[in-house]
C-alpha cells in the first residue's frame, strides 16, 4: 500500500468536515505532528478547526511514532502535540493563513514543504561530502601501502591535490582540503583495511577445498628476521585466492622448529584446515623445513623449493667471474670518482652516444649484472678510449677471448634475466613455470652461433660445454618438478593427456565442445 503525501491529504473540499482516512505514522515525509497539523490547518479555515473526536484520537495515538514536533511554517517545536496545543499554536502564529483558500492553500503548502526539504538537503550534501572525503582517504592510503611508499607521503599528496583543485575547480577546493592524509591517519586506515582483509580471509577459509603456502625469510634494516607467509587457495566454486596472510617478526632464534611453530600458528589463526594443505614452497629457507612436516596431517602435501631462488643458484655455475671482476673494476673506476664520472659523461655526449652513463650492480641480486654487462659491451669502444685518455692499461679489455666471453655473458644473462622476470608476479602456476624453464635450457647456443660479429672466431665447443653444465644444473635442482610432470600435463592439457584411470572421469569434459573451445581460446 502506497503512503499518501501531505499534498494528497488536503484534497477534500473546503467547508466540509472529514475524517482523515490515513495514519500520520504512514507518511514518508520527515514532518512533525505540528507539520501535519499545519497541512490540515491550511485545508481548514480557523473556524473549521474542530476535527472530529476520533480523528484527533488517531493523532494522539500515532504521535508517539512520529518525529519531533514542529511547524513547517515557523520551524518551531511543540513540546506536547495535543489538540489544544495544536489549535493554540495555529491561532497564535498562523492565523494569517485563513485568507488562503482552495488551490492557493495547496500551492502554499507545496512551497512550505519545498523549503523544509531544501533545509534537509543542506545536511544531506554535507553528509555525502564527508563520506566522499573519508572514502578518498581510504583509497589513497591503500595506494600508498601498495606502492610501498612512506606514510609521510600523504601530506605531499594532499598539497598536490589542493594545488590541482585551485587551478581546475576552485569551487571544490574545500572538498579536497577535508581529505585527511596525515601520517597517523594513513597508518590507522591501513591497519583497518588490513584487519578487514584478514577478517574476510578468515570468513572465506571455511570454503577452501585445498590451499598451498609459500614462505620466505629475510632480515630487515633493524636486524630482525621477518618471515613472510603467502597463500594460494581454491574454494568449492573454483575461485582462486592469492594473498600475503602474515609477516611474522622473528625476534629470537630462527631454527626449523621456530619457523614451523610460527607457520602452524598462523594457519590455525586463519582458520585453515591443515589437512587441506596441498603444497609447501619454501623460498630462501633451509630445505629441511619440509622434513619436519612428515606426520599427519602434513604427510600428504607436496613441497618444492623456490624456482627463482634455484634459478639464481643455477646461474652461478656459468663461471663468469673473470668477466664480472674486470667489468666491475672498470665501472667502479669510472663511477667511483666524480671527475672521472663527469669526463666520461662528457665523452659520451661529445660522441652523440645514446647512453650517458654505465650502471653499477649489486652482488645481492646476481642477475642485475645483465644491465651493466650489456651497457659495458655496447660502450666498450668509448670505455677503451676513455681509459687510454686517463693513462690506464687496456690490454686485458682488448683480448679477443675476453671479449668473446663478455658477449657470451651478455647473451646468457639476458636470457636468464628474462626468465627471472617471467617467474615473478601473481597468478603464476607450477605447470607454466616448468615450461618456461624447459624453453631456455638450450637455445642460447644457437643465439650465440648466429651472432654476426663474433661467429667466425668463437670457440663454440667451450660455450656448448658451459650450456650443458647449466642444463644439468637445472635438471638436478628441479628434479622435484619432473616427478610431478604427469600431474602438470593433466592440469595443463586435460583434453589431450590423461591417465587410463582418469579417462572415464574426463570423458564428459573432453566431449564438451564449449569447454574445448574455451581451452583453445586461452591457449
Image: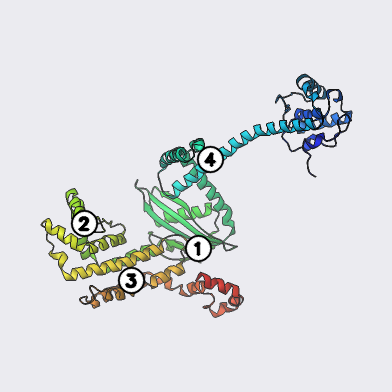
CA separation in Å, label 1 and label 3:
29 Å
Which residue position holds label 3?
A: 473
Q: Mark 3, mark 4: which one is toward the viewer?
A: 4
Report helix, strand or loop for mark 2: helix
Please tell me how crowded label 3 is: few (under 14), some (14-19), or many (20+) other residues with Cα within 10 Å. Answer: some
Please tell me how crowded label 2 is: few (under 14), some (14-19), or many (20+) other residues with Cα within 10 Å. Answer: some
Asked if residue 295 can be seen in this view, the reply is: no
Please report whichever mark, 3 or 4, sits nearer to the chain's N-terminal start.
4
Q: Please give left or right for residue 281 compared with residue 97 in the image.
A: left
Q: Quadrant of residue 39?
A: top right
Please report whichever mark, 1 or 3, sits nearer to the chain's N-terminal start.
1
Report helix, strand or loop for mark 4: helix
Asked if 510 appears above or below 427 in the picture, the reply is below
CA separation in Å, label 2 and label 1:
60 Å
* Residue 19 in the image, given as x and y percentages of width and height: 87, 33
411 or 247: which is nearer to us? 411
Asked if 70 appears above or below 134 in the picture, the reply is above
Please tell me how crowded label 1 is: few (under 14), some (14-19), or many (20+) other residues with Cα within 10 Å. Answer: some
Q: Mark 4, mark 1: which one is toward the viewer?
A: 4
Residue under the point 38% across and 60% down? 286
Q: Which of the numbered marks, if any, corresponds to residue 447?
A: none
Residue under the point 88% across and 32% down? 18
Q: Decide: marks 3, 2 in contact (CB < 8 A)?
A: no
Which residue position holds label 2?
A: 348
Q: Please give left or right for residue 16 compared with residue 191 in the image.
A: right
CA separation in Å, label 2 and label 4:
52 Å
* Residue 182 in the image, given as x and y percentages of width and height: 45, 37
Please report whichever mark, 2 or 4, sits nearer to the chain's N-terminal start.
4
Q: Mark 1, mark 3: which one is toward the viewer?
A: 3
Amino acid at each position: 500500500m502506497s503512503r499518501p503525501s501531505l499534498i494528497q491529504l488536503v484534497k477534500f473540499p473546503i467547508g466540509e468536515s472529514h475524517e482523515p482516512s490515513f495514519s500520520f505514522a504512514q507518511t514518508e515525509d520527515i514532518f512533525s505532528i505540528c507539520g501535519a497539523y499545519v497541512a490540515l490547518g491550511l485545508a481548514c479555515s480557523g473556524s473549521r478547526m474542530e476535527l472530529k473526536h476520533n480523528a484527533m484520537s488517531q493523532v494522539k495515538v500515532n504521535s508517539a511514532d512520529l518525529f519531533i514536533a514542529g511547524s513547517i511554517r515557523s520551524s518551531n517545536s511543540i513540546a506536547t502535540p495535543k489538540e489544544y496545543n495544536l489549535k493554540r499554536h495555529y491561532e497564535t502564529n498562523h492565523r494569517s493563513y485563513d485568507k488562503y483558500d482552495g488551490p492557493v492553500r495547496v500551492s502554499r503548502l507545496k512551497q512550505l514543504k519545498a523549503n523544509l526539504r531544501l533545509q534537509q538537503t543542506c545536511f544531506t550534501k554535507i553528509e555525502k561530502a564527508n563520506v566522499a572525503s573519508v572514502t578518498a582517504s581510504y583509497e589513497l592510503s591503500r595506494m600508498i601501502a601498495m606502492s610501498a611508499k612512506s606514510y609521510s607521503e600523504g601530506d605531499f599528496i594532499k598539497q598536490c591535490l589542493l594545488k590541482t583543485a585551485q587551478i581546475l575547480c576552485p569551487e571544490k577546493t574545500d572538498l579536497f582540503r577535508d581529505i585527511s592524509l596525515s601520517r597517523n591517519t594513513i597508518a590507522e586506515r591501513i591497519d583497518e583495511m588490513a584487519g578487514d582483509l584478514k577478517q574476510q580471509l578468515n570468513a572465506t577459509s571455511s570454503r577452501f577445498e585445498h590451499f598451498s603456502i609459500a614462505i620466505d625469510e629475510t632480515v630487515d634494516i633493524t636486524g630482525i628476521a621477518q618471515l613472510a607467509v603467502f597463500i594460494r587457495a581454491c574454494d568449492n566454486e573454483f575461485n582462486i585466492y592469492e594473498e600475503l596472510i602474515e609477516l611474522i617478526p622473528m625476534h629470537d632464534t630462527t631454527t626449523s622448529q621456530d619457523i614451523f611453530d610460527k607457520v602452524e600458528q598462523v594457519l590455525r589463526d586463519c582458520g585453515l584446515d591443515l589437512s587441506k594443505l596441498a603444497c609447501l614452497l619454501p623460498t630462501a629457507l633451509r630445505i629441511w623445513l619440509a622434513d619436519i612436516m612428515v606426520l599427519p596431517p602434513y604427510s600428504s602435501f607436496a613441497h618444492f623449493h623456490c624456482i627463482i631462488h634455484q634459478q639464481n643458484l643455477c646461474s652461478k655455475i656459468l663461471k663468469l667471474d673473470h668477466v664480472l671482476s674486470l667489468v666491475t673494476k672498470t665501472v667502479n673506476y669510472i663511477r667511483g670518482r666524480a671527475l672521472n664520472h663527469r669526463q666520461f659523461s662528457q665523452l659520451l655526449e661529445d660522441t652523440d652516444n645514446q647512453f650517458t652513463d654505465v650502471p653499477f650492480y649489486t652482488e645481492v641480486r646476481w642477475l642485475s649484472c645483465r644491465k651493466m654487462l650489456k651497457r659495458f659491451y655496447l660502450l666498450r669502444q668509448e670505455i677503451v678510449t676513455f681509459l687510454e685518455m686517463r693513462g690506464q692499461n687496456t690490454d686485458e679489455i682488448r683480448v679477443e677471448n675476453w671479449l668473446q666471453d663478455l658477449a657470451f655473458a651478455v647473451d646468457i644473462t639476458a636470457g636468464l634475466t628474462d626468465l627471472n622476470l617471467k617467474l615473478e608476479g601473481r597468478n603464476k602456476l607450477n605447470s607454466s613455470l616448468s615450461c618456461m624453464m624447459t624453453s631456455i635450457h638450450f637455445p642460447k647456443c644457437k643465439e650465440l652461433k648466429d651472432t654476426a660479429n663474433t661467429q667466425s672466431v668463437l670457440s663454440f665447443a667451450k660455450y656448448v660445454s658451459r650450456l650443458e653444465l647449466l642444463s644439468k644444473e637445472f635438471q638436478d635442482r628441479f628434479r622435484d618438478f619432473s616427478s610431478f610432470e604427469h600431474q602438470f600435463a593433466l592440469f595443463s592439457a586435460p583434453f589431450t593427456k590423461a591417465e587410463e584411470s582418469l579417462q572415464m572421469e574426463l570423458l564428459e569434459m573432453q566431449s564438451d565442445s564449449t569447454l574445448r573451445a574455451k581451452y583453445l581460446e586461452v591457449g
